Amino acid sequence: MTKLVDINDMNPKEPLIEGVITTRGYDKRLIKQIKEKRVTGSEQYYIDPQLYLNITAPISGTEASYAETEMFLRNYDATIKRYTEGTMKVFFGIGNGDTETWMHRLEYNAKRYHEICAIDAQRYYLELYLAGLRKFILGMQGGIMFKGLNMFFDEAAWGKLDFSNSRLKRNTLVVLGNTVGNYINQLEIFNILGGCMKEDDFLLLGIQLALKKNPELVVSRYDDVFYNAMAEDIRRRVESVGFQLPKKIRWVYEDSFVKALCGDTTLFLSKKYDLDEVEDIGKKTGLERVERFTDELQRYALVIMRKNAEKTTAQSKRNHTAPSIKLS
């Protein structure tokens, strides 16, 4: 049984990761994926703990993280706040915490009570997140309940996410950074997300869009120092568990997926979306789009979906395209 921790009352001398469930080991997934000739989703990012959830630091990161954060900031007060404020946040994947940090700055004021569940296959990220969160909430009066789940997304279920003594009626699942694009079977990941939502819960989804008029640009964004180093790190870890791969890594863009290939093994893949396609997949899994936001160049999008399609009318759907803004 998970121990629920009120961070405000936590003794700083207690183990940092108390309250986190530890599930099956990381290497089991890696070996399973190698046998299936794909290791997608196994990438690791090494983050400076001092910068994680640092409310005084400027946003830094890739073009994608900038664009996603810009859209969130641009539309928060007028629109996003209406859906996310006063809901329990369920973060599917923590990553580098860029957009999560801004969500905390805007929503986690000193007087309001909050509930947070964070899910990640890598315990390292959960430790970073909880450490940053504890520093972030110093001086808060409202209180924060936190649950960290060290598991894969397909292990998540509605009953595992909620607090038994929750004070909040609805949840917002936050899935940013094109995380859903790491799944070859898109119905699989949307079914997982839909299965973790109750009636009238919301999903805040961050995706990258397909550049139909300039597909070569999609590949060029990945064939750089950062992503090549990431792919090489995956290749080395594959070899560390006893599998041999060619040295050369090549990037391709086919069937709406960017792939890093090493021989016939896919080290990494990331789907690029058409907005209507996302809505169609959502409908098949019981989710209906209520808002969507794109950047000025139509490269990235934030989509808000709600569980139970029959409660959303066509008239309530809105599209927003916003120019870039400077982050500080």
Image (cartoon, helix red, strand yellow):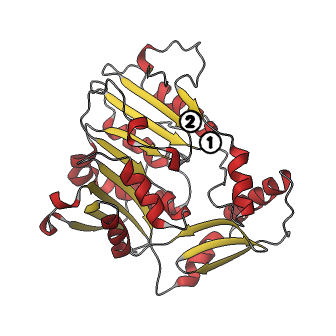
Q: Callout 1, which amino acid?
A: Gln
Q: Nearer the viewer, residue 328 or 87?
A: 87
Residue 126 numbered mark, or none: 2
Is label 1 in a helix, a strand or a loop? loop
Q: What residue appears at the point 54 percent right and 63 percent down from the top-left corner?
A: 183
59 left or right of 245 in image: left
> Which residue occupies 51% across, 67% down?
185
Residue plotted at (59% across, 73% down) = 258
Q: In the image, what residue type sits under mark 2?
A: Leu
| Between 322 and 92, the one nearer to me in the picture | 92
Q: Which picture quadrant has residue 41?
A: bottom right
Crowding at label 2, few (<14), some or many (≥20) Cα neighbours within 10 Å? many
Which residue is at the far bottom?
213
User: Alpha-carbon distance for marks 2 and 1?
Assistant: 7 Å
Q: Position of residue 310 (x, y in %)?
A: 17, 60
Residue behind mark 1: 122
Give coordinates of residue 271: x percent, y percent. 52, 70
Image height check: is 221 above or below 193? below
Residue contact at pointers 2 and 1, CB within 8 angstroms: yes
Q: How many marks?
A: 2
Q: Is residue 322 visible?
A: no
Q: Which quadrant would residue 17 be assigned to in this image?
A: top right
Q: Is residue 289 left or right of residue 71?
A: left
Label 2: element kind: helix
Question: Label 1 neighbourhood size at 10 Å, few (<14), some (14-19), many (20+)?
Answer: many
- Residue 134 in the image: above or below residue 35: above
Q: Where is residue 314 in the image (x, y as percent from the top left)?
A: 15, 69
**Where residue 10 sits in the image (x, y, percent)?**
48, 15
Q: Residue 245's quadrant in the figure?
A: bottom right
Residue name at image x 67 percent, y 63 percent: 227
